[in-house]
Image (cartoon, grey):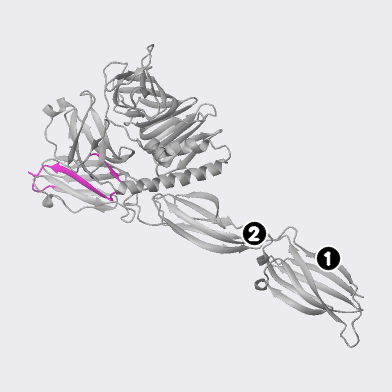
Amino acid sequence: MSFYRFFKLIAIATALMVGVSSAAKNAFGNITYVAGGNQAEHKKKNKDWKQAKFKDKVYQHDDLRTGDEAQIKIQLPDGSAITINERTLVSMAELMNENGINQTLVDIKNGKVNFDAQKQANGSNFKFKTGTATAAIRGTAGVVGKSSKSKMIVSLHNGEVKFTDEVTNKSAMVKGGQTAFLYKDSIVTLDLPSSGDPAVYNIIDTLLNDTTKSIDEVIDAIKNSEKQYRDYMDELRQSIQCSIAPLPDTVYEATQTVKATCTVGTLVGIYEAPIRSEGEVLELTVNWAPSLVGQKKIPLTCYIDGTHGFPCGQVNTYYAGSAGKSHSKPEPLTITSGSTMEVCNSSNITIEGTFDSTDTQATLYIQLGNYKSDELVHVSVGGHFSHTIQVSDKQGNWNATKAFVYYKSKKNGDQKKEIDLVINKSCKAINLIFPLIEVSKNECQANISVNNIDGDNAIFSYFVDEQPQKERYVESKTSFPIKLKKGVHNYRFVIEDLAGNSKEIQKEYACFSNLKNPRIKLSKGRKERLRVPPPPSGISNIIYRQLSFTVKGLPPGNDPRYIKEVKIVQDEKEIANLKTTDLQSNTITQEIQLSRGKTSTIDITVTLMSNQILHATKTYEVH
């Protein structure tokens, strides 16, 4: 598959998140977007397949299927949304809504589905099923599907899912930033920053088909491919900037207009076909059933050339219903910037709202983690306040899950508002502190110490002679040992956090543990008989020969650095003393002097780095 084709398949992402409701027990959803013409089909119960159409209603027991490059988006009764991607077949096995209790079960026969689920009320259920596996959704955004091997894959951007396999009776909680899949009889869960993106699903689906790889090799390949894709998408995100005007904290109309200003050329959409930005303010209309009172989250998706898409903002509000407006009185404190704020590409969040300014003695301040603002009433105009807070690991507040606005007034009493924070620690704008790694050595063991990952997650990996070894997930300051390989090797130790910040240390370490069968192998055996003609008259009886022997059983590949010392003694006289630095290989050659008509004994002593001592003796008889 080409690079372009790969990313085209995985790029179409987030679906809308506001829904439609029916007072009847048998509820229905609405098709809000169709792509692919006759490749997108809808089949009602006991009816024939027909081309899916915009605004068609989808009921319980309806089936939907897509062909190549086709897509169907559906709003569900509880305000959740699903996107049926290309080459997918699903059945709406259950779609019920009564007295605020929703029961939704989407049976994925083949392919994958993007989802963005509203938080489920008590008694409500939202599930996906693929054969024997189920995923129970709890206010979550991500992608779920049935792989080519008929196994479930779940990948979450945020929230959590309970993943259950009925055959093995195993289950696992999968959280935002994680991807899980069935492999043989196990549920494998991986921390992948791009989780929730269809790219992760496609990467895993492709690699699970490679039967030549072990599960460890598959996991390594998944992580490498995900990082390559993440780096690519980070470059795209940096080319797009969007400013989205917040809706009021509470709205009373079931139709709202979201205003956004984005980089020229960006396609921006909520649920229908995206609109191209020319640099002006875009107005995107969103609506829901007037009876559907409750919290609303409205995500925006940005596309480059209609191909590469990613979430570029979210608007949050609370719909109180049209009846609430006529009977309500102005609140002493209102948050207009939304009840949920995501922190990622910018480390700054701006909290805005209104307060009753008629009480001149009132006080107002904002608290986020260990940060507390100055008093804000005296710097606000006309009862409107706006305050920006930087969120990051350096600020020490990135573990906060909520920000609080406090308004104290004798006239109105004390007021408190909470803003939910979704802090994405995989974003470089807020994950500023690089992890640290220290390495020390003790004989055949490397001692690893990891620091600077408080509140972060990191992956430790190491390489021996550039060959990857095992990885380890690190969630806090920790120390642990690693067993070194025998011999002398180049080691590279790497620690990388959620945002891709990394540090590495390179070392050459030697491990000289006892060897099982080291030995000296003498060239031409332990005894040599040399027949040499007598020299001419007046010529010396001395002759010269090359003593050659090999030290065997040295790892790896008979590395001579395992040899500490070589002593060669001839007839009780030392003729050579060689150190490690004198040796070019494990085969040693030494010139020796022999005399005609005499026997000479050579004693060889080899001391290894492990302090093992090897001996060999060779006799020369010269006739």
Q: Residues within 10 Å of mark 2 (few under 14, many from 20)?
A: some
Residue at image position (39%, 46%) is 230
Disc with the residue nearer the chain's start (2 vs 1): 2
**Between 43 and 15, the one nearer to me in the picture:** 43
Question: x and y percent of residue 202 in the render?
Answer: 44, 36
The image quadrant of residue 601 is: bottom right
Residue at the top extreme of this rendering: 46
Question: x and y percent of residue 265 in the render?
Answer: 25, 42
Give, as a three-letter code, the residue at label 2.
Answer: Lys
Residue 518's place in the image compared with 263, above or below, is below
The image quadrant of residue 76 is: top left
Name the element at disc 1: loop
Q: Which residue is mark 1?
A: 524
Residue at image position (56%, 33%) is 184
**Between 597 and 138, the one nearer to me in the picture:** 597
Q: Which residue is mark 2?
A: 486
Q: Residues within 10 Å of mark 1 (few under 14, many from 20)?
A: few
Residue 574's place in the image compared with 394, above or below, is below
Q: Is residue 131 visible?
A: yes
**Between 318 and 327, the one nearer to me in the picture:** 318
- Residue 358 highlighted magenta (yes or no): yes
Point out the frontmost of discs 2 and 1.
1
Judged left or right of residue 189, residue 309 is left
Residue 95's place in the image compared with 613, above or below, is above
Name the element at disc 2: loop
In magenta, the rendered stretch is 338-362
The image quadrant of residue 300 is: top left
Give, as a three-letter code, the residue at label 1.
Answer: Lys
